[in-house]
Amino acid sequence: MTAYISLMIAIALIGALIAFLTKTREQARAVALVASGISLLISLIMLSRFDSSLTIMQFAESYNWIPSLGINLSFGVDGIGMPLVLLSCIVIPLTVIFAWGETKEANKFYGLILLELVGVLGVFTSRDFFVFYIFWEIVLIPMYFLISIWGGPRKDYAAIKFFIYTHVASLVMLLAIFTLYFNAWNITGKPNFDMFLLLEKYQLLDGWLITNVISIKDAIFIGLLFGFIVKMPAVPFHTWLPDAHVEAPTAGSVILAALLLKMGGYGLFRVILPLLPFSDSPGRMITLMAIIGVLSILYGTFLALAQRDLKKMVAYSSISHMGYVTLGAAALVPLSVSGAMFQQFSHGLITCVLFMSCGVIQHSAGTRIIGDLGGIAKHMPKLTFLMLAGFLASLGLPGMSGFIAELLVLLNSYANLPTFVILALFGIVFTAGYHLWAMQRAVFGTFNEKLGHIHDGANYEIASMAVLILLIIFFGLYPNPVLNMMTATATPLVRDAAGLLGVIV
Amino acid sequence: MADLYMYLIISAVIFTIGSYGIITQRSGIKILMCIELMLNSANLNLVAFSSFNDNASGQVFALFSIAIAAAEAAIGFAILVALFRVRDTINLDNINILRW
Amino acid sequence: MSYVLLAPEILLTVLALAVILIGLLVSDKSKNILGYISAAGLAASLLLTIGNRGGDTFFYNALVIDPLSQIFKIIFIAVSLLAVIASIHYFKDNRNQDEYYGLILLATVGMMVVASANDLLSLFVGFELASMSTYVLAGFEKKNPSSLEAALKYFIIGSLSSALMLFGMSLVYGVSGSTNIPEILAYFKTAQVSGIDILAMVFLVAGFGFKMALVPFHMWAPDTYEGSPTVVSSLLAAGSKKMGFVAAFRVLVLALVAVRADIQVVFAILAVITMTYGNVVAISQKSIKRMLAYSSIAQAGYISLAFVVMTQMSIAGGVLLALGHAFMKGGAFLAVAVVGYMVLSDNKNAKNTDDISNFAGLGKRAPITALSLFVFFLALAGIPPSAGFIGKFVLFYSVTSEAVSTASTWLLVIVVIAILNSALSIYYYARVIRYMYVLPPAGERIHEPLPYVVAILLAVIGTIGIGLYPEPVIKMAMDAASVLGVI
Amino acid sequence: MFSEPDSIFPAFIVLLPVIAFVLTLFLGKKFPHGGAYFPIAAIAGSFIISLGVFLEIYPDKIVQQSLPWFANMNIGILIDPLAVVMLMMVTFVSLLIHIYAVGYMSHDPAKPRYFAETALFTAAMLGVVLSDNILQFFISWELVGLCSFLLIGFWYHKPSAAAAAKKAFLVTRVGDVLFLAGIVLLYVNLNVLINKGLFTPEHGNFILQFKTMFEAAKLIDPTQLTFITLLFFGGAVGKSGQFPLHGWLPDAMEGPTTVSALIHAATMVTAGVYLVARTFPMFAATPATLSPGVPDSLLIVAYIGGFTALFAATMGLVMNDIKRVLAYSTVSQLGYMMLALGTAGAVVGAQAVGISLFHLISHAFFKALLFLCAGSVIHAVGTNDIREMGGLFSKMKITGTTMMIGALALAGIGIPFINIGTAGFFSKDRIIEGTFEYGEKTGDMIPYAFAIIAALLTSIYIFRLWFMAFTGKPRSERHPHESPNVMTRPLMILAFLALIFGFTHLGFYGYLEKNFELMGVEVAGHEGEAAATSPIVVLLPVLVGVLGFLIAYAIYYKRILNMSKIVSSNNPLYKLLLNRYYEPTIGADMIGVKLTHGVVAQSGEFVDRKIIDGLIIDNIIGKTTFCLGEIARKLQTGVVQNYASVTLLGVGLLLIVLKLVGGI
């Protein structure tokens, strides 16, 4: 048993601590780059050794921690976790490179970024619900600081809103976890926080929480769902996101959108889907999720259409893209679910480019208001090229990863959720709409002289964006490396669920 | 039996007087005295019960509490004196720098 | 019956007297030594306590040594130790140090007696011993009006509630015919409930609730914590507060079995009101000490959830949170003390040194303090991995599981309220954190005095240590809970 | 060597331009003409390969290659007669236009970008043609759209260009979404069939391969099938600028003229027609409920196509921008192709594909020719407005002549019965005859009416264009000159083709007829040889063509009547036409900007900021908490007696509560 995962987390953690202690920004960013680079290396090794045909947890490791509560430090990845681990290890180094020029309190800055890596890696790999929750919470703190120290004018409001909003969600989730834990303890007679045990014993639970209003099962289900969709975020629990994004520094937004939102989706696949068939009213739950998903898609799209701030527009576009994840998960068809998983992965890559573009523009032109920009393509050819590529990827252009994800979701969800898929299809036109509208107003057209002298993005910024674009295209043409393992895991997961519900697979 | 109730009623009355005093009085001294009243009403209870249950522990308890009450009073006066030195008053209505 | 088990108490008592005696003999200059002596003594007795194995009763069943007393003694001694170490700097060159340390030690002894009280009498005596020493400590800055006012308020409400408590005890004695807790327990196991019992119970709750600072018996707490010398506030908030809890465990949970249902109702109400009030009011505080006071009121609200369900898990959770709170709150107050020192070193006659504005840029001015304060705040907010989180975790878990297993909506509502509260609390902690790390510093970086640093770091170690490896303390807490013979 | 199942050459038909794209994009600056030679060489290569493939597979072989891709999708190549003729046409026309562009774009600083994008476009178009499954088809289709977006917006610093590019992408996007929906619906239906065991794809075939689709077409529930095909047609409507999604195409003329020639005349816009032709067996399999013996989908295709042909031609009459005239003529010609698929499809089944494709290709030649001529004119006089031209013929003999040839071809002039004539004569008139046969068969003469009137208008507007541009006296003092050889040579080649291509028609029809049989799919019914058509029917199209020529000659050359009365803003009909039936106003402004952007989006914004966020989060939750806090802290009066009273009050309340819950 090679302890890849704990090694990866440990390296990130140590790197973070060292980064905090460094004196100069050169040291700090070097440390950050090395640490995240090593974890990328490890994740690549894992990918190469990962057996896509297996559905069980791989690279599993487990250490006693709190025996009296049955809590173990146990990690492992399967087709759900591995791609996200990979994603995290790709995004963080690129973020570090992108933020190579950070000067303000650089040591803290890079340290916090590495802490984020620790948090998300932990979330995506823990097999113990307690550990899962701890990492889930840890993620909040660095992000709070990233927003409130390096953020924009309303950073305090945004940061605290982000912190409290998502914290409430995770506490509600915690309650549900308590109940699962208690139930498993009752049944097996000994405390144990093992995630899969808890999920498995869920079906043996019954009774009313509030007599004849809501059964315990449904309450648990909804509690967990709430915890996850707030993170995703799904309409109507999304309002923390635009504020957070608008105020956060670029690196913060990138990590927030590319990794933190994915935690919510991860929860859907890891926790919600196994429970779904056993909840007392699975039909209603599926409909609920589907409604949330489609609502997010359309609502996010239209709000993106209404934005004047480029970054805010991108923020809403994330909401609408994450809607596909919910929709695909709710459809309970193997390929739709793996499509949703792939959507997580690909959105992780694409949104990075979008936020980085916003960052470069903000940095160079001093504003992100679409109306105040215009014609910057003239002075920022490199950026324009990458940004256009990113926008096209985001509006689902074939050949880019986003297309494959959304196509799989739409193609395969229709069987179970026809109405919702048709609604979602409407969104596509408008998705293209706001992307192009923004490009046309902000980047093309005649140059707005008021902007004065603006320069193209720095090389490190352009480089990191270029790498992302290449990855997007690569996975758009050849998604199999991650898609296969996703499908491998999704298939049994869904077959059980769908088998019990008798829906089409 | 009956007299036990008399004791209890008396102690209750004393207790009430004490608490009423604490609420209404302004002077720190008077408030201290009211507190003493309340403590002693409890002592009265103890003694009465002790003879009713005929075991001694109640009376022992009463002795202890009397001693403690004495010490308490001493500390109370000490604090009041110190306060009087700096504030020139022991009217508790005026002693409210710390609030909200 | 081996008096070795009582060694910590004995040691501290002797030490207290010794310290006062030495104080009479040596010159004011050399009184600084006393701090080190009493610190050493406390450390020794802490070790003794931890080292103690087995249990026994003493003095005709008036004191008992059992896991419950053990863990609370550890809390009390640890808190006093932190306070004393910090005081080495806080009261440097103060000519009354001897009395100060003597009082702290005596207060500690008093709390320890309460922790292991097995008889209403010993409980009362210990209670009063601790209270009176702390009355004096609160007013120890004789020239400082707010310190004196704090002491006065503390004293008046304190003695009022000890009167209530005594009255309650007298009623218990009257009903059960004994002051000895096991005997009272034996009586109540058989007796059927009468109005008197309820009356007694409520009086006792009022008496203990004063120490725990439960709303509405909390009124003194904010003023006193704000007014008293900061190290003393840390002793009060972190230490003597817990005295109320252990007393309540001993008397209410253990002895008054007959009226458990009513106790649960009472505490359900008190807990909800207390945590909500504490958090809501804390939001709008400018003075950090006052904010911490309200936050510790809120924490008391959480802890008293233990009485609402009274399962072993919940009691254990209460004990754990009490333990965690001792470190977090104690440490936090000490950190505030550092800030006070910092402000005064900027400007000799600065008023309310704990105003939030003084925390601006603390991360730059006093990094260790700021970082520790940050840790304490997160712990208080219940963010893992920290003692605060472990405590809340077990506690909330116990309530939830009870709610589920008894299908009780009310319990569920309560725990949801608790959760919302703990989310709300983040707001005011984060506000201070923002001052420390986001806002620009108001002055130079200062040199943090060693004693403070030691004390604060000890607190940090306690907070994080429990968070990272809670196994041993959870075991202890479970044993402690098992003493109370709850289901 | 080209057509073996494992031959790598077919793949290179697409790969060569892709490679050229990358090279030009990144290395173009370093080479003369912005690296124009990369795409030219690459496309020449593709053309040669296509030719080789054609020679090998003619007359009765097809090339099929397929590899698994992701999930249950595959990526593959299918070269059947339909594909191979398209391949040759696309590569050839594209090649000529690239060569022409070397001259036309010589002054543009951004040449590398231009050639890179056109190369990518060619690759995408070839991808469309080659695909053996509907998904790959869709993907290439989208890339084609992307390239057109990029090329229309090539001069992105012109706001009008940027806007046109956006409009083009969005409008076609509407079609694409319909297309995608069609694919989704098809996929689901196939899955249902497979799960029910009613249908299993042959071993090694994938679910979305055309072969599989066609085989399953008969099993799919008819109404569903109609939906599917109509959704596909929706996609085609978008791409081929059919009514009501035609608006983007005239605006697309913002791009360089070469782009208009390449994309918006010869190739991309024909992709829509190609889609319908490609999936013709499914259209043909749809039930006939609206009109006896006519599959519903084909009927609708016919009507949309016919209507568009007429509708666009009317607007072509009044446009003054030389390129817009040609653009509308393109729309209208595409309408003809659709019309052919619809009507002829109903009469002669799969032959319709041949008929339509033949017009598609001849149109590609003469429309490319017309556009290049227009480009040459614009290059010379530096304006698009035909009112500022005139008398150019003396200066630009080659352009003038070739353009006249193009015009004749467009108008379909030729000599009936002895079958001598321009390409258009054979291709378009065959379509019109087809509509007539359709009319005879079904008694529904409306399509024929559409076709014949459109033919008249066509010939009027194209000759109007020619006369206004090349005859009369110059209406602006510029000094036009004939274009360089690099531009005129392609004109000549295309003109030559426009003249002689028509003679291949019989062989062409024969070759494409077998298309679907070669795939092993028999197209549903409607066989039956075309009825012997009466001479008048054969004559009429040519007559209207000539008539149109005469009208234009009379009005614009002889000036027998003064246009200024008709061409005036107080003539409602003229205004209606000039404003393009107010389509831009309704489409772009009202639906696009006002409704979506103004109403829906803004109201959403309002809900989000003001209600969800402002009201609930900030005010109800946030503010209330703070107020509570302020109130509650005021209880802390600081007066100790109050504290005592609160304490005692607490005791009292507790007792009362316990009394209430029944403790005492």
Image: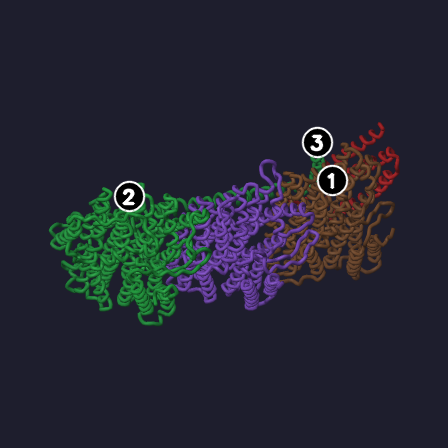
Chain colours: A purple, B red, C brown, D green
Q: Residue D16 placed where, x, y %?
A: 36, 66
Q: Is residue D625 above or below residue D130?
A: above
The amino acid sitting under disc 1 is: Val
The amino acid sitting under disc 2 is: Gly
Q: Nearer the viewer, residue D16 or C146?
A: D16
**Chain under callout 1:** C
Q: Nearer the viewer, residue A243 or A127?
A: A127
Q: CA distance from mark 3 to mark 1?
A: 18 Å
* Residue of label 1: C205
The amino acid sitting under disc 3 is: Gly
Q: Mark 3 or mark 2: name the one nearer the start of the chain.
A: 2
**Chain under callout 2:** D
Q: Nearer the viewer, residue A157 or D520?
A: D520
Q: In the image, which disc is placed on residue D662?
A: 3
Q: Are marks 3 and 2 in contact (CB under 8 Å)?
A: no
Residue density around tag 3, few if under 14, some if 14–19, many if 20 or more, within 10 Å: few
Q: Is residue D601 above or below residue D18?
A: above
Which secondary structure, mark 2? loop
Nearer the observer: mark 1 or 2; the answer is 2
Q: Where does the C terminus of chain C fall, quadrant-wise?
A: top right
Q: Is residue A28 above or below residue A132?
A: below
Do badges 3 and 1 share one subunit?
Answer: no
Which secondary structure, mark 3? loop
Q: Residue C14 placed where, x, y %?
A: 84, 54
Q: CA distance from mark 3 to mark 2?
A: 86 Å
Q: Residue A408 placed where, x, y %?
A: 45, 53
Left or right of C348? Residue D531 is left
* Residue of label 2: D293
